[in-house]
Amino acid sequence: MTATAAPAVRIVEVGPRDGFQMERTFIPTPLKIATVDAIMAAGIAKLEVTSFVSPKVIPQMADAADVMAGMTRQPGVTTVALVPNLTGAERAAAAGVDVVKQVICATETYNRRNVGLSVDESVATLRATVGSVAGRATPEAVVALSFGCPLEGIVTEDTVVRLVARVVEAGVAEVSIADSIGVAHPRQVASLLRRLQREFPGTTFSLHLHDTRGLGLVNVLAGYGEGIRIFDASIGGLGGCPVVPGATGNIATEDVVHMFEEMGITTGIDIERVMDATRSVQSFLGRALPGRVLSAGTRARALSTAAARA
């Protein structure tokens, strides 16, 4: 990695939010803060710090405001908080978050299960949020289950395009397209992202991918091939889906960074420092996390070790 090179892709770290919220054991606030600080110090310039949601729904996020207050702000780093509704958006903006991000599911059944609202109600909430946080935070949106739903099955491109149109009309300039349960394949990813960029040329799209069936990294490359340059990832591959049995987590930050850097595509991220942060979380959780590079080490280290033995 060249320290002075401008990153060719942006990796958005979602572990402190998407990864941590799946953990049943409460992660101490100081460890959350230390993890966020370490991630920023590693060169990650945008990260989901927390979620401003009712602690009755997600107890892990009960300390959202404390994490925001305790973290060390870094110049040029964008902080993101997920919000389910207008109340959450107001709390996030008051805490000084740079970006408030709302999830809307592509299927009616899952959206009601996820946030207790119809898709129409979630879109109305998004419009209200855009107006409410104006001048204080930037609104973004996630279209979840863009490639398939565990409750309704196949999700068509037309369904996603219609929902994205409503999100963009509400005033959102950056939309994350999410494979929330890890059912996407590369051709599907390429086709949908090609169409979305053609139909919404003024909108920035990112990808949120899971590695449930081992296709996470090839789906990253499919998106990259279509011009996508922003990808969510989670330290160690933390995360999952509470509705899908056996669903593993997000694509691992270390794995994505390693792949791009080995290809000569700069990320601006120090992978060793990211892994140090991941190991601290892994140690607390008391189990091995699924990230492959975290376990096996980098390609460069493996080859240098082999060369030294020769």
Image (tube, rainbow, N blue to C red):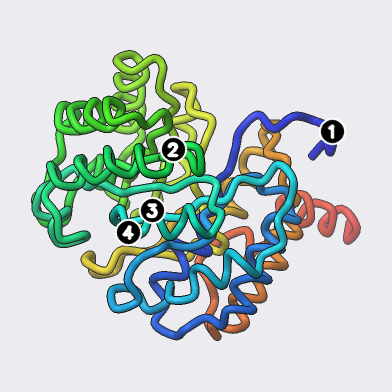
Residue 100 drawn at (x, y percent): 44, 48
Give residue 157's position: percent from left, percent from top. Answer: 19, 29
Please, what secondary structure does the residue beneath circle 4 have? helix
User: Which is more toward the observer, 49 or 88?
Assistant: 88
Q: Amino acid at mark 4?
A: Thr
**In terms of depth relative to the viewer, which is nearer, 178 or 245?**
178
**Label drawn at residue 134:** 2
Please state, as top left, top right, bottom left or bottom right, where the C terminus lies in the image. bottom right
Quarter-of-image position of residue 32: bottom right
**Residue matched to label 4:** 87
Of residues 231 and 85, the one drawn nearer to the viewer in this rendering: 85
Residue at x 57%, y 46% (from the top left corner): 256
Instruction: Tell me how far mark 4 sits from mark 2, CA to CA.
Output: 15 Å
Instruction: Choose the circle earlier in sequence order: 1 or 4.
Output: 1
Can see residue 295? no
Above-or-below relation of 48 to 265: below
Q: Tags 2 and 3 in contact by the CB under 8 Å rule?
A: no
Check disc 1 and report its element: helix, strand or loop: loop
Nearer the camera: disc 2 or disc 3: 2
